[in-house]
Amino acid sequence: MKILVVDVGGTHIKVLATGQKQPIKIESGPTMTPRIMVQRVLAATKDWKFEAVSIGYPGAVVHGKPMSEPHNLGAGWVGFNFKKAFGCPVRENGPAPGFPIWPVSRCRLMMLLFFQTPTVLWLAPML
């Protein structure tokens, strides 16, 4: 399974997918709504193939859904239907240390390696 990993930040959205070597950076900020984010991510990755999306969200996430609006981005994140917007399964995750440098999928368990000192291995069920 090919996974698109989206790390939502206050100044940039970082995007990487299984099989890609370089992440893409998309500028964000106080006017970045989830709809605009999805449009820009899909435009930037139009030539990439992926079957699911994992979103690193800069706020509280409960049961895979944002519970509060981020203070440094536009409104509309709570209750936004990312699955419908991306057109595939989506897993939303709260803040994690570092940026995912390599998504790997196996047996419906998604593993993201984060580059930080020390390196952290983070596991999350995908579907």
Image (spheres, grey):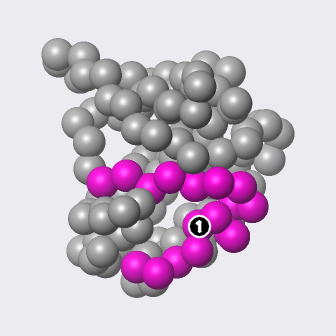
Identified at 64% across, 64% down, the residue is 83
| Nearer to me, 25 or 105 | 105
Residue 89 painted magenta: yes
- Residue 122 vs residue 55: left or right? left
Q: Position of residue 111 (x, y in %)?
A: 45, 27
| Nearer to me, 91 or 99 | 91
Q: Residues within 10 Å of mark 1 (few under 14, many from 20)?
A: many
- Residue 109 vs residue 12: left or right? right
Q: Which residues are magenta?
A: 78-94
Identified at 30% across, 74% down, the residue is 67
| Kind of element beneath mark 1 | helix
What residue occupies the far top of the structure in this picture? 118
Identified at 69% across, 32% down, the residue is 2
Where the N terminus falls, by quadrant? Answer: top right
Residue under label 1, please give it.
82
What residue occupies the far front of the structure in this picture? 107
Identified at 52% across, 78% down, the residue is 80
